Amino acid sequence: MRTFFAPWKRIYADRETRGFDLADLVVTFFINFIMRVFGSIMRSAVIVVGMFTLSIVIIAGLVFFLLWILVPLAAVLFWMAGMYLIIFK
């Protein structure tokens, strides 16, 4: 959580003046706040896209694994169907 709210790409605003300058404090605060909010939104989006991609890869992997297991069975069944057609038709 410490880095989740870190500024995006480490973009932040430094104070321009020394001492008390209300305008400079407000501008710096809002720029840093916006960069932290943007950083958390972008990190959330990356996490969601990553989880979606990972789930798609897992599902596709399971489908291809099942197909890989069933290919020898399909080959035997097609051979038997071919023999049936040759002999009895």
Image (cartoon, rainbow, N blue to C red):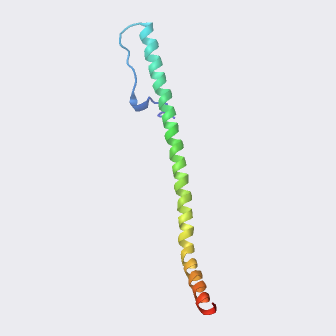
Q: Nearer the viewer, residue 69 or 16?
A: 69
Is any part of residue 4 visible from this angle?
A: no
Placement of the C terminus among the 4 image quadrants: bottom right
Going by the image, does 18 lie left or right of 78?
Answer: left
Q: Residue at x 61, y 87 (%)?
A: 85
Q: Residue at x 50, y 27 (%)?
A: 37
Q: Residue at x 47, y 31 (%)?
A: 39
Q: Nearer the viewer, residue 25 or 50?
A: 50
Q: Quadrant of residue 35?
A: top left
- Give above or below for 16 relative to 32: above
- Give above or below for 27 relative to 68: above
- Give above or below for 85 relative to 21: below
- Give above or below for 9 relative to 67: above
* Percent of width and height locating residue 3: 47, 34
* Percent of width and height locating residue 34: 48, 23
Q: Nearer the viewer, residue 10 or 59?
A: 59
